[in-house]
Amino acid sequence: LRKHGDILDDKTVAVSNAKKEIEFTYITLDTPQQKIYNDIKYFTRLKIEKLGKTEIKQLQPHIFALLVRLAQAALDPGIIAIEDEKTKERVYPYKHLPWGSFSKNKWILQFIENNPDKRFILWSPYTKILDQLHSHYIRSEIIDGRTPIKKRNDICERFQAGGFNVLLANPAI
């Protein structure tokens, strides 16, 4: 892990010689989650089509919102927030669905349980996911935008020393 103070000069960064392993796993969405994904895609497409032949600049926020919601649906539909058209408040239409019941969450929890001695870093752009994972797996720590610098350094040192084996991080750090 690179942390504050690792920069040796303007162009050199200290790099650990420890063996690093990157693993990619493709996970198929289960049927209920796939339905949510498809519904979001369908209704957002209708909304974009309803806008008609407007300039691309006006469509960009809608397209970006679609991509964010699809990414959320593929990870955990419970984190999807939409604006209620009448009240203009943020609502979470899938919040009632139990966390850990979706394909990726099940895989992550199973991976952690099956590899109790393996240390790894799990990145998520969604802090709600990091918080949920942390509450389900006590031997983890979170580093994200809410974490003070001094605490980040302490967490990095404890992770490198083997004090815990799952580091949950947000790419915005």
Image: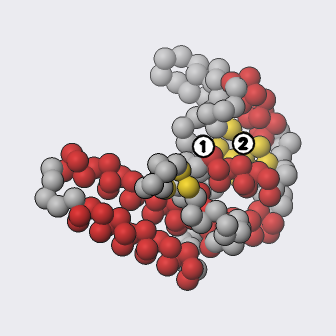
Q: State the residue in front, 83 or 26.
A: 83
Residue 136 at least partly seen: yes
Q: Amino acid at mark 1?
A: Asn
Looking at the picture, how far across and down is residue 35, in whole percent?
Answer: 49, 78
Q: State the residue in front, 102 or 9.
A: 102
Is 90 on the left or on the right of 168, as rendered?
left
Alpha-carbon neighbours of circle 1 within 10 Å: few (<14), some, or many (≥20)?
some
Task: Identify the element where label 2 is drawn.
Answer: strand
Looking at the picture, how far across and down is residue 82, in whole percent?
Answer: 49, 56
Q: Residue at x 58, y 49 (%)?
A: 126
Query: CB of mark 2 within 8 Å of CB of mark 1?
Result: yes
Counting residues from the start of the chain, the first of labels 2 and 1 encountered is 2
**On the image, numbered disc 2 is attached to which residue?**
142
Task: Identify the element where label 1 is drawn.
Answer: loop
Q: Which mark is residue 34?
A: none
Q: Residue at x 62, y 73 (%)?
A: 103
Is 168 on the left or on the right of 173, as rendered?
right
Quadrant of the frame with the C terminus: top right
Q: Which mark is residue 170?
A: 1
Q: Residue at x 83, y 46 (%)?
A: 164
Is 23 on the left or on the right of 70, as rendered?
right
Name which quarter of the figure residue 145 lies in: top right
